[in-house]
Image (cartoon, coloured by chain):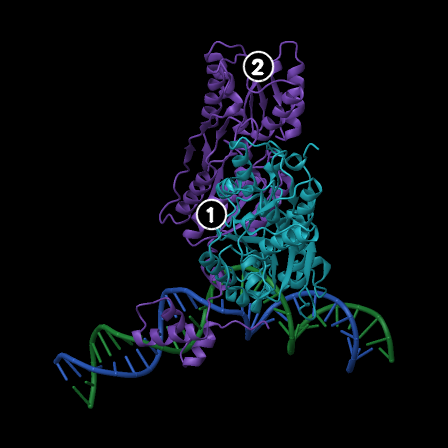
Chain colours: A purple, B cyan, C green, D blue
Amino acid sequence: MKKSAVTIKDLAKELGISPSTVSRALNDHPDISVETKKEVNDLAKRLNYEPNVVAQNLRSQKTHTIGVIIPEIVHFFFSTVISGIEEVAYNAGYTVMFCQTSESYEREVKDTKALLNQRIDGMIASFSKETTNFDHFKEVANKIPLVLFDRETDDLDVSKVIVDDYYGAAIATQHLIDQGYSKIAHLAGPENLIISAERKRGYEETLSKNNLRITPEYILPCFKGTMDEGYHAMKRLIDLPNRPDAVFANNDMAAYGAMKAIKDEGLNIPNDIGITGFSNWQFSSLIDPQLTTVAQPGVEMGRAAARRLILELEAKNETPKPTTQVLKTDLIIRESTRKEK
Amino acid sequence: MKKSAVTIKDLAKELGISPSTVSRALNDHPDISVETKKEVNDLAKRLNYEPNVVAQNLRSQKTHTIGVIIPEIVHFFFSTVISGIEEVAYNAGYTVMFCQTSESYEREVKDTKALLNQRIDGMIASFSKETTNFDHFKEVANKIPLVLFDRETDDLDVSKVIVDDYYGAAIATQHLIDQGYSKIAHLAGPENLIISAERKRGYEETLSKNNLRITPEYILPCFKGTMDEGYHAMKRLIDLPNRPDAVFANNDMAAYGAMKAIKDEGLNIPNDIGITGFSNWQFSSLIDPQLTTVAQPGVEMGRAAARRLILELEAKNETPKPTTQVLKTDLIIRESTRKEK
DNA sequence: ATTGGAATTGCAATCGTTTGCGGGTTCGAT
DNA sequence: ATCGAACCCGCAAACGATTGCAATTCCAAT
């Protein structure tokens, strides 16, 4: 069953020439005569020769492989990013190796080590929610190019691709205000993620800019970003003596949980309470009412990260200075904030 | 910046012993004295030595890498399968390399070749919708263990992990009948996929078993499985002189498109028309009305495929006979078929 | 006929690790 | 004092491909 693969030596023996000549012929080296090249290539095709990438990797100290570390595969946003990475990598002749941390710091540390041992040429990563120490990524960055996306940190001086979370939060909040809502609550994300902090900042500064007070009771943590968290947080908001009339959620899932809580209380969306999410998950346009949310360009983000990484990998001279690419977020206005005036 | 990695030779030179001794010490070979082992291990830790996996791979002719070929990453079902594969592979010490074919046959052929060249130890795959010729997978199966999941073919004598599509379709159809629907239509999947054929068969035989006629006009193709297709197919069904009172859709997306069409026509779900999907996409429990559907155990499927592959990879003696593991499907009854009696 | 130089090709080392085999040392037993 | 058995360890080849340098061939020019 398992045939032993054809090697360069087999071709050489068959043709009565040396392996080095075969190698050069296959690589179209100018030293080799056209006749020899033809002979070699013909035989290679006939015997179905395929170069052993592992041997080439060892020799060249390159693997043409990029490692990807993501928190969760079963997550609409991340799956679109992966898709973008894979697309660009494939077209540039790279293969992709990936690990999911399942939002575990410990797993993330192990994964970075494992990928380094695999001798990947470069890495694209997004932190787990637990991650507050970045030594493992510093080690990565010491050895190979690293590009971070979405979740990042100032601790690492590497290239990044992020979305304008502040701007996204600001337009979402402004939209709520423009719709006539004034008591706007916020379901906040994990504090150690810059993206959550930026969203919260966008929310708060937009309130201030519109001369609205920032009410601490209106800001509730939804660190895991689950429906359940959103549901219970919303229940608490509704029970407040002066309950909010709108919610800006850090993510769509929490928003969806909140919607459920609002409906369970017999309140109407968007007339009693308006709500917006963040991420534009696939389901957000399918639920009832459809959820207004901030769209993040996932595929584009993956593409940008991969393009940047490959650029750094193939930089001839010096390693390029790290860049930070900021992608625009878009407000998708749907029914959950379309208040009847 | 980029430090040159520590090799076994560096350790050997430092300790004044030979590389072979270092290698044996690191691998806990009985020939080496405990003192030497300790010395070597201590130094290795101190210098932060990490074995070069590429060199080990070349030497051992194994990569401890499994290749995965899937049609589409941004797809709830497939992302859960990947997640299951990754989980099992990681725990068994394997890394995962993946390619998405984007449902293109041509891309699938290229991907299989690329992964073979990478010298993966084994492969897990699910065909693209376009695939009708399986020569490229035969070549794979000739060289390494291959496990197919979900979409498979009788042309390949390899291990498979599938769900009981026939059974799923049968219980879904029977459920519709039990709810009092009698004119049941079917939005069919691509004919070259066994899974679609099985679902259709389950639908038709269940009708027959209940003494209901199979009406050809009630069976419409939705090969791509998009919302749009479902929408237009449903429009046509509604326009029939004798329009159906229920729909069994080959997948959730098409079902969702159909739901939209029904609502647009001013008809009520489930009272005028009942509907069930297939796959249990995440959004199916979130939409209004919630969609009754057949759940496929995605994560479990990925785990089973990975476990099976690793079993074949690590079989000491003969290559095991191919097996086909059939996972149960589950009917998730929700609002879209909960007719008021 | 001799030499020069271009055109081809081969030798051998290299990438980092593993491993069969053989060589040396130590120690107890006779 | 000698022998043999443990016990450790090193030599060198191997995995498959690439490449600097040297070697060979061939042909034309002197």
Question: What is the chain letter for disc 1?
Answer: B
Question: What is the chain letter for disc 2?
Answer: A
Coordinates of residue B282 in the picture (x, y in percent): 60, 38
Coordinates of residue B302 in the picture (x, y in percent): 64, 51
Judging from the image, what secondary structure is the residue with disc 2 in?
loop
Q: Residue at x 66, y 69 (%)?
A: B319
Coordinates of residue B249 in the picture (x, y in percent): 58, 45
Q: Which mark is residue B272?
A: none
Cα separation between marks 2 and 1: 55 Å
A35 w.r.t. B245: above or below: below
Task: Judge left or right: residue A32 versus residue B240.
Answer: left
Coordinates of residue B123 in the picture (x, y in percent): 58, 59
Label 1 sits on what residue type? Lys
Label 2 sits on what residue type? Asp
Q: Is disc 1 on the same chain as disc 2?
A: no
Q: Which residue is mark 1?
A: B2
Of the pair A31 and B236, the residue shown nearer to us: B236
Of the pair B321 and B46, the residue shown nearer to us: B321
Q: Nearer the viewer, mark 2 or mark 1?
A: 2
Q: Which residue is mark 2?
A: A245
Q: Is residue B210 visible?
A: yes
The crowding category of the residue bearing disc 2, from other C-alpha atoms within 10 Å (few below 14, some 14 to 19, many at least 20), is: many
Task: Judge left or right: residue B291 versus residue C12.
Answer: right
Of the pair A74 and B181, the residue shown nearer to us: B181
Judging from the image, what secondary structure is the residue with disc 1 in?
loop
Quadrant for the N terminus of chain A in the image: bottom right
